Amino acid sequence: MIPVIMSGGNGTRLWPLSRKGKPKQFLNLFGDTTLFQDTLARLDGLDDLQAPIIVCNYDHRFMVAEQLQELNREHAGILLEPFARNTAPAIAIAALQAQQSAEDPLLLVLAADHVIPDVQAFHQAVNSAREQANKGALVTFGIVPTAPNTGYGYIEAVEKAKVSVVKAFVEKPPLATAEEYVKSGSHYWNSGMFLFKASVFMAELERFAPEIVKACRLGISEAQKDLDFLRIEPTAFKQCPADSIDYAVMEKTDKAVVVPLNAGWSDVGSWSSLWQCAQQDELGNVVEGDVILEGVRDAYIQSEHRLVAVLGLDNIVVVETADAVMVASKDSVHNVKAVVNQLIQSQRPEAETHRLCYRPWGYYDCIDVGQRFQVKHITVHPGASLSLQMHHHRAEHWTVVSGTAKVTCGDKEMLLSENESTYIPLGIVHRLENPGKLPLEIIEVQSGSYLAEDDIVRLADDYQR
């Protein structure tokens, strides 16, 4: 059995914490590990398990690799989608990749951003599904509903049993219909998790959506290996229709069965669901960071950078980050996408990126920005280096805060230690490296007429950007 971890989502419903540049699956929402890492750890204890295949978008590739490395986890491929094409193509390229390493493996398809507290119940459901998948079924995991939730699609089973043939997939229903579904006992929330043989899935996909199979086969056959990653050929994949596995296969096949899962599952799809999943105090509050409350109940309050005080308000969400603050009633958090859309229309960077930006060599924090200057706090991992580059519109001053910097500036090389600095003139080829065994921290002051990240001409790069 090969796990397929789907990690292509942007998680905008948890803005401002989750953004396109670092979505919720890569955040530490419940302790020291991320949702992506929790998904991997949840697999421990399952029998006959091979290394996972990860499907993600190009911009998240280094976060995936780093978080795998933090857990010391092997993988069977990190597949980079050049374009978002929904779940059916994503699973198809993973199936084609898996068939290259095993004759006809079972694929356990999981989302990278789900919460499943009861791991034992999850394992029991997977083991029940394994028997059905080995017989040629396309197994989906149906979440036993705890409330008439109108935010999920539903799976209707032919009978209430440990395994049942699927009667129908139902779109998100109105409240009255959802209440009937919960009472019936034969309707489950659609989790988007599956188990099936790679060959069976590909045969059904070929039957119902042959154009997806054609594009994915070409994309995989002409994929390029890049460090730990496999870049799917973009021209072929761009022609692939965008479709979910439900629409493309599961709603049409006669091989669909459902295995109920009652394990405290949540897709953490909103601030309200995050509040429900987190540890609440005696007043129903979830508090993260430097927070003072007075007369507050049933609230989620998170502060990342400064003191947040809330008085006399109930049933609210307050989230503070370095560059944004969101305040909402829990009844209105489903509208957060409207805020993100406004930011996108205004071309504001807060829609997609945090002030703290991660790169394969480390990260930087944009401390201050003015009309013709920008100040960054840059951290470079031991042994890592930025690209050999130049800028058309800005000069830079570098001051070492801690560690040792190897600096290339034109035809000169120099070593700088704590409190030493250098100047990079406009148009000069330069590079920053950390030759030491400790993190390198520098303060970079940029000055010039144009300071955006696209004023970087890379001449050489260890990460092939």
Image (cartoon, helix red, strand yellow):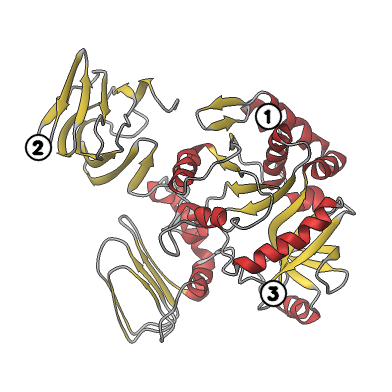
* Residue 122 falls left or right of residue 256: left
Look at mark 1 in the image and give the residue it sits on. 220
| Foreground pick, 245 / 193 | 193
Could you tell me if the residues under marks 3 and 2 are in contact, i.e. CB atoms within 8 Å? no
Nearest the viewer among 268 and 76 is 76
| Quadrant of the image occupied by residue 187 | bottom right
- Mark 1 lies on a secondary structure that is helix
Label 1 and label 3: CA atoms lie apart by 38 Å
- The amino acid marked with disc number 2 is Asn
Query: Where is mark 3, residue-wise?
Result: 145
Question: Could one spot residue 289 in this view of the protein?
Answer: yes
Res. 11 visible in picture = no
**Extreme right residue here?**
254
Give the residue at the far top of this rendering.
411
**Residue holding disc 2:** 419
Q: Quadrant of residue 83?
A: top right
- x, y (%) of residue 93? 69, 37
The three-letter code of the residue at mark 1 reads Ile
Q: CA distance from mark 1 to mark 2?
A: 50 Å
Q: Looking at the image, is mark 1 or mark 3 earlier in the sequence? A: 3
Q: Secondary structure at mark 3?
A: loop
Task: Name which of mark 3 and mark 2 comes first in the sequence.
Answer: 3
**Pointers 1 and 2 in contact (CB under 8 A)?**
no
Give percent across and percent down for residue 3.
Answer: 65, 48
Name which residue lies at 51% across and 57% down. 35
Q: Earlier in the sequence, mark 1 or mark 2?
A: 1
How far across and how far down the image is residue 193, in percent?
69, 57
Distance Cα–Cα, label 3 vs label 2: 59 Å
